[in-house]
Image (cartoon, coloured by chain):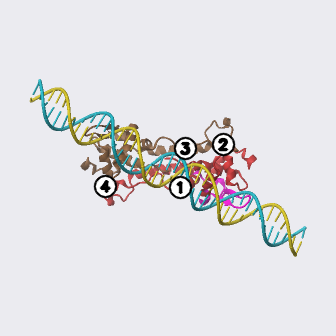
Chain colours: A brown, B red, C cyan, D yellow
Amino acid sequence: MKLSAGVEWSIHCCVVLSQAEQPVPSARLAELHGVSKAYLAKHLHQLARAGLILPSEGRDGGYALARVAGEITVLQVVQAIDGERPAFRCTEIRQQGVLAQPPEKCLEACGIAKVMADAERAWRDSLAGTTIADLAASLDTSRLDEVL
Amino acid sequence: MKLSAGVEWSIHCCVVLSQAEQPVPSARLAELHGVSKAYLAKHLHQLARAGLILPSEGRDGGYALARVAGEITVLQVVQAIDGERPAFRCTEIRQQGVLAQPPEKCLEACGIAKVMADAERAWRDSLAGTTIADLAASLDTSRLDEVL
DNA sequence: GCGTGCATACTCGGATATAAGCTGTCCGAGTAGAGGGGG
DNA sequence: CCCCCTCTACTCGGACAGCTTATATCCGAGTATGCACGC
């Protein structure tokens, strides 16, 4: 189980955008963090598709937060980049092989799938408890005013 | 973020092994669940390396649980297959690029890394709250006596 | 009848191909802004 | 002096390679069992 590195980049970018008054181009965000420009652009595009940030084209264009930072949770950013599909996917092997259960006994979800789903729910709940505004408050944003 | 399918196989196998009195060969476990024999053997080997199951060689050999089912948690199985490395790895991009922070300000962990670590801790705690014995009690193990 | 040795068949374990997804890069379509020209 | 047009430069967006990881498979080393033989 590995989370895309783009998640880290995206969260950092959202924190920066929360402090910006004007749209920030993807290339600028890339050099601010020292990462690949084109690859970061890919992730920012995903954030835009998810409705978290708003793109503006043309000269002086760039990205801006679609909502106030306090209404964007870390979970939303993670799911925008990583997708909303659960990490554990039950393949219903209880219905396969020699000891296959009949379908009428499989109306309810598999006990194993339940445990994994509960764990992922705990994970999501934890991520949903922090917003970009919370991160901006904890991180040092003093230098942002110089460069934005 | 995607969890290996071997995790699901391994948990099912542990539940079966908890009901078995004799060692069960990997090939038998594979046909019980209708999965690839050789690939399952790879995962069972990982479980053995983690100390969760004990292999016995030679004729009538196979795998048996190393401890009673109540002392094997789902988390241990997941970590044995998927590894113990966290899904999110902070690459310290706060120290890179134009707005790089000086090292003396990075003695503490990054706020983003903290949030992700907390979420993963909640995920692990949830998985650690269920044992193989709990799963065996919830799943229907009536047909196991016939085939073991 | 009992102990010993051997052959055998079965087990696990590691080394080897194949496919998928993440990582990284490039170029093209579209647009907001600036500048120049005309009224 | 003001308005309009064009041109440009800059933006995002999607299409294209490289690489690590997961998936699937095969064959070889090692061993407990069962049988046959000898005592």
Report the residue marked by disc 3.
A118
Q: Are marks 1 and 3 in contact (CB under 8 Å)?
A: no
Horizontal and vertical percent position of residue B129: 57, 50
Q: Which amino acid lies under the numbered mark 3 shown in the image of this protein? A: Asp
SS type, badge 4: loop
Q: In the drawing, does residue B84 fall left or right of residue C4?
A: left
Are labels 1 and 3 assigned to the same chain?
no
For the point 66% across and 44% down, which residue is it? B139
Q: Nearer the viewer, residue D4 or A9?
A: D4
Q: Nearer the viewer, residue A143 or C14?
A: C14
Q: In the drawing, does residue B124 fall left or right of residue A34?
A: right
| Numbered range of the magenta stretch | B47-74
Report the residue marked by disc 2.
A96
Q: Nearer the viewer, mark 3 or mark 2?
A: 2
Report the residue marked by disc 1.
B83
- Is A139 drawn above or below residue A61 in the view shown? below
